[in-house]
């Protein structure tokens, strides 16, 4: 396993760092004000562009949708 420990969350801003099957923390739209993060496995990448300043939008295997703030584990 490869760990990415980037505290500023910039690793979630580049699509090249996000792949289905990796463990991430996302912020859902309803949690943007509070900053509550949801952990899960990426099922689909929803953002088409290579970069998004607020994080790449993904759908988790649980069905939750949000923007990636932190990549926890790659290649699970």
Image: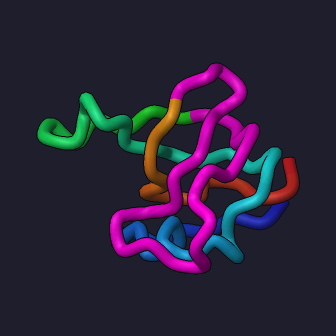
Residue at horizontal 62 percent and vertical 22 percent from the top: 63
Residue 74 is situated, as x and y percent measured from the top left of the image, at: 77, 59
The reply, left or right, for residue 67 in relation to residue 4 is left
> Bounds of the magenta span?
40-64
Left or right of 71? Residue 21 is: right
Residue for point 71% across, 27% down: 61
49 up-or-down from 39: above or below: below
The picture quadrant where one finds residue 31 is top left
State the residue at coordinates (77%, 58%): 19
Query: Which color scheme is applied?
Result: rainbow
Q: Quadrant of residue 30?
A: top left
**Residue in front for this viewpoint, 26 or 65:** 65
Identify the main secondary structure in magenta: loop
Residue at point 67% right, 52% down? 45
| Residue 34 sits above or below residue 14 on the image | above
Q: Quadrant of the N terminus?
A: bottom right
Q: Magenta span has 44? A: yes
* Residue 70 x %, y %: 49, 58
Q: How many marks?
A: 0
Specify the farthest residue to the left. 33
Q: Is 65 in the magenta?
A: no
């Amino acid at each position: 396993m490869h760990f990415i420990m980037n505290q500023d969350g910039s690793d979630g801003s580049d699509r090249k760092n996000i792949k289905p099957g990796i463990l991430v923390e996302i912020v859902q739209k309803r949690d943007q004000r509070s900053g509550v993060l949801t952990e899960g496995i990426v099922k689909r990448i929803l953002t088409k562009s290579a970069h998004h300043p607020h994080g790449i939008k993904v759908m988790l295997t649980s069905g939750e949708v949000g923007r990636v703030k932190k990549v926890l584990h790659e290649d699970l």
